[in-house]
Image (cartoon, grey):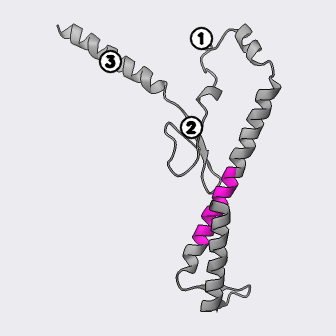
């Protein structure tokens, strides 16, 4: 009875580990331009599922050479679509970074505002200048962020 429970436990553990190994893998770039990887996509960034792009590490898991050669034949339409998706992703990332930067600047302007000039002297912004800059940032956020 004891060996039956042990064998059952071992089977369950092996099944659970195989399921964990079959998880998806995501890649995303944060607002600072750093690339991250994870098994779950983040809520605040657009992530790309890269599970299909990974190659087996073990030669026993690798596809036969004939299958690999047939995959390497180029399909111009697929290559074009892939390049388009990459361009769109980069454009979306640029827009997201610009949107986040404009929102940060607007948050800074909502408090008391002072800048440091080239000589290191603090220069205060008048309420009128602050309001004009805030309106300009609001328009920028509407244009970039939608």
**Earlier-in-chain disc, 1 versus 3:** 3
Q: CA distance from mark 1 to mark 2?
A: 25 Å
The residue under label 2 is 26
The residue under label 3 is 12
Q: Which residue is painted at 33% across and 14% down in the image?
A: 11
Residue 25 appears in the rendering: yes
Q: CA distance from mark 1 to mark 3?
A: 24 Å
Q: Position of residue 61 (x, y in %)?
A: 59, 14
The residue under label 1 is 60
Q: Which residue is painted at 62% across and 60% down in the image?
A: 146
- Determine whether label 2 and label 3 are within 8 Å by CB: no
Of the pair 144 and 33, the residue shown nearer to us: 144
Q: Which residue is painted at 69% across and 45% down in the image?
A: 89
**Earlier-in-chain disc, 1 versus 2:** 2
Label 2: state its secondary structure. Answer: strand
Residue 124 appears in the rendering: no
Residue 96 forms part of the magenta stretch: yes
Of the pair 121 and 105, the residue shown nearer to us: 105
Query: In front: mark 2 or mark 3?
Result: 2
Span highlighted in magenta in the image: 92-105
> Vertically, is 137 above or below 48?
below
> Vertically, is 5 above or below 117?
above
Decide whether the magenta segment is chiefly helix, strand or loop: helix
Label 1: state its secondary structure. Answer: loop
């Amino acid at each position: 009875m004891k060996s039956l429970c042990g064998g059952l436990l071992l089977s369950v553990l092996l099944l659970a580990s195989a399921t964990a190994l079959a998880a998806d893998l995501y890649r995303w770039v944060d607002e600072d331009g750093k690339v991250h990887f994870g098994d779950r996509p983040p809520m605040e960034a657009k992530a790309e599922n890269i599970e299909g792009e990974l190659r087996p590490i073990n030669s026993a898991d690798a596809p036969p050479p004939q299958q690999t050669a047939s995959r390497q034949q180029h399909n111009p339409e697929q290559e074009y679509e892939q390049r388009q998706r990459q361009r769109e992703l980069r454009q979306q990332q640029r827009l997201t970074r610009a949107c986040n930067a404009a929102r940060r600047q607007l948050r800074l302007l909502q408090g008391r505002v002072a800048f440091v000039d080239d000589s290191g002297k603090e220069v205060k912004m008048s309420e009128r200048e602050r309001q004009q800059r805030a309106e300009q940032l609001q328009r920028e956020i509407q244009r970039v962020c939608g």
